Image: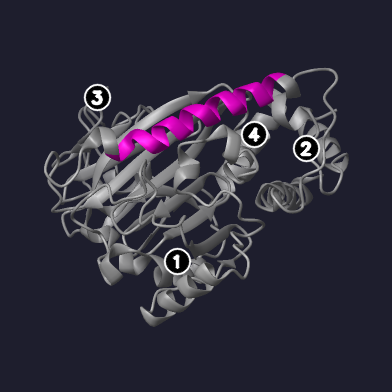
Amino acid sequence: MSDLAWVARQFAARRAGHTLPQGLYTDPRAFEFDMTAIYGQSWLMAGFECELPKPGSYLSLMVGKWPVLITRDRQGEVRAFHNSCRHRGSVLCQPGHGAAARLVCPYHRWTYDLNGSLLAAGRMPDGFDKGEHGLKPVGIECVVGAVFVCLAETPPPIADFAEKFAAYAAPHNFKDAKLAASAVLVDYANWKLVMENARECYHCATGHPELSTTFPVGMSKHFDAGEDARNAAFVARMDRNGLAQTPVEGDWWQLARFALNEGCVSISGDGQHLSKKLMCDIDGGDLGSMRWAIDPHVFAHAAADHTFMFSAMPVGPCETHVFSKWLVHKDAVEGVDYHLDQLTDLWTRTNGQDKWLAENNQLGVNSPGYTPGPYSQDAEMLAQRFTDWYCDKAGAYIAAHVD
């Protein structure tokens, strides 16, 4: 049986409204399929334009096992490339942030402009055409300061998402932000278990006591807070301020703005702002949280004072790297307007708690006694939405590639 046929049988066995068959969480064949059919065919959020503050800045990242390089060229345009030298394939820039006038391969010193064109290739024969050996581009879209990439030869449509995202995110001024902190956490669990956990708050009241102080963990379905008077007042206030708040979604994304717990103006340990210099100062910075989620790998929250982004990248069948980023206003001064330990504390705690939950989930899924279980139709609708999307995306890929 071919690997693709095996994968197709796994999806055919999936029961509606239930978690996935065991093999899709554990088997190397499923991991390879996920890299090609899911991460290789989806729009992924790489980060923010503020991570490339000037011409010559670059951001190098791994999309699973694939290196990607994002640059800001001399004209200020943000570009994306496969981070693979056109000589013998070496990685040009190691993962992380940096700045360079040119991109120089550390192996044989082939040299590229920031726009990807090959400038120099020593000891090559007469007639060698540098124009045919530029870096291979990756699909990229920048939307109000956020950066999205897609490795597919023909990326899926993004215009509808870009329009809706701009309406929600523009007031948070990502282009006037700076990256205050970043972190990576290794979860020894399949990326889908990490993301299912990230898509529901059924576990939050007991699993995240610190987060529950400010985050309304009792909301159901698509961040539905019900018809209580406080929520109605929040909706009316956001409407008066011209801030989009009604939950909207597409095939692979969701957007919403919702009220935090009573007396809270930010997702923080005490519910108060973590930075005195606000990213959005409308209504004194009492704006709840603007939350967006992108399948397969991201959720993020933008409050008035800071923005937090979570990104899950698969590394192996039972290993996922969780990347976190925190933004504050570009003029906020560390140690004066904000303190790094306070800024990062809540989500660092939460991610650590989720790491244990996902790894414990993986251990149980590995059991010969594992049987896919039903999702709560009240508390886990977004987790089910995620796995439904995954199955639909996979099904479309299989249909297009089956012999």
Disc 4 crowd rating (10 Å Cα; few below 14, some 14-19, many 20+) is: many
Where 9 sits versus 285, above or below? above
Residue 155 position in % (x across, y down): 53, 57
> Are the residues flagged by discs 3 and 4 in contact, CB closer than 8 Å?
no
Disc number for residue 20: 2
Which is more N-terminal, label 4 or label 2? Answer: 2
Quadrant for residue 205, please give it.
top right
Residue 55 position in % (x across, y down): 16, 51
Which is more N-terminal, label 1 or label 3? Answer: 3
Disc 2 crowd rating (10 Å Cα; few below 14, some 14-19, many 20+) is: many
Q: Which residue shows up at 52% across the image and 63% down it?
A: 255
Element marked by disc 1:
helix
- Tell me the CA gap for discs 3 and 1: 39 Å
Secondary structure mainly formed by the magenta segment: helix
Which is more N-terminal, label 3 or label 2? Answer: 2
Q: Which residue shows up at 46% across the image and 78% down it?
A: 236
Comparing labels 3 and 4, the label whose residue is closer to the camera = 4
Question: What's drawn in magenta, residue-wise?
Answer: 343-363
- Tell me the CA gap for discs 2 and 3: 43 Å
- Tell me the CA gap for discs 1 and 2: 30 Å
Residue 389 position in % (x across, y down): 69, 52
Which is more N-terminal, label 4 or label 3? Answer: 3
List the residue tagged with mark 3: 106
List the residue tagged with mark 1: 165
Kind of residue at badge 1: Phe
Kind of residue at badge 2: Leu
